[in-house]
């Protein structure tokens, strides 16, 4: 159902599964609302020895091709391997990214991100939003995922200044402080028109 909410926060993806024997293509369109990125899996996928993962690493992981060795193709009736790839067709105007940290040592994977994000190479639809400005970050303070404290950083749309929200305390800050914040959990990006 079309609404202001769907216009602002929803896009869609397409997962293509292709038979390697006859090239038959099965498309599966899915609603896109929040992107979930498992940071430790992405770190292993990139074969990093350090604990840093970039936001671009996350999108490269998201569109990586998966190969499934056993699949029955309804088109050629053979049992063969298939490969599947998910692409963002149309991205939301407000993009929400949830950073899944897992437990234990996985919890400390650090995400590297900038104030602006260009996703043009990851999006199929030519009229889709692709250039984004960071407007909010939710961070976690504490030694593990069992407890701790959450702090939000938000960018004011009127004066373009950053503010730190720590319970009842609100203080002005700079983006450098936001980037140094411990363990971001959720990133909020807003579409910026480029032309």
Image (tube, rainbow, N blue to C red):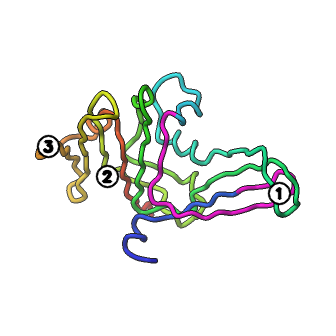
Which mark's residue is nearer the viewer, 3 or 1? 1
Q: Secondary structure at mark 1?
A: loop
**First in residue order: circle 3 vs circle 1:** 1
Q: Secondary structure at mark 3?
A: strand
**First in residue order: circle 2 vs circle 3:** 2
At which x and y percent is residue 183? 34, 35
Q: Is residue 141 magenta?
A: no
In the image, 127 versus 67, the foreground residue is: 67
Seen in the image, is 183 located left or right of residue 52?
left
Give above or below for 57 relative to 18.
above
At which x and y percent is residue 116? 40, 48
Q: Residue 135, which numbered label?
A: 2
Seen in the image, is 18 located left or right of residue 149?
right
**First in residue order: circle 1 vs circle 2:** 1
Q: Residue 23, which numbered label?
A: 1
Q: Residue 128, which numbered label?
A: none
Tag 2 and tag 3, C-beta contact below 8 Å: no
Give above or below for 6 relative to 174.
below
Figure label count = 3
- Classify the position of the C terminus by image quarter: bottom left
Q: Residue 171, which numbered label?
A: 3
Give the prevailing secondary structure in the magenta stretch.
strand
Q: Residue at x 30, y 45 (%)?
A: 138
Q: Which residues are magenta?
A: 17-40
Give above or below for 135 relative to 92.
above
């Amino acid at each position: 159902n079309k609404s202001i909410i769907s216009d602002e926060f929803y896009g869609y993806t397409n997962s293509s599964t292709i038979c390697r024997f006859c090239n038959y293509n099965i498309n599966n369109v899915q609603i896109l609302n929040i992107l979930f990125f498992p940071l430790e899996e992405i770190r292993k996928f990139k074969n990093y020895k350090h604990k840093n993962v970039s936001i671009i690493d996350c999108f490269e992981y998201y569109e990586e091709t998966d190969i499934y060795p056993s699949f029955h193709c309804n088109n050629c009736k053979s049992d063969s391997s298939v490969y599947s790839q998910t692409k963002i067709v149309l991205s939301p105007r407000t993009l929400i990214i949830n950073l899944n940290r897992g437990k234990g040592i996985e919890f400390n994977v650090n995400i590297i991100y900038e104030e602006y994000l260009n996703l043009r190479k990851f999006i199929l639809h030519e009229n889709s939003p692709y250039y984004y400005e960071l407007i909010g970050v939710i961070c976690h303070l504490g030694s593990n995922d069992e407890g701790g404290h959450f702090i939000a950083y938000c960018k004011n749309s009127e004066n373009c200044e950053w503010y730190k929200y720590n319970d009842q305390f609100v203080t002005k800050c700079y983006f450098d402080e936001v980037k140094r914040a411990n363990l971001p959990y959720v990133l909020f990006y807003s579409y910026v028109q480029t032309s």
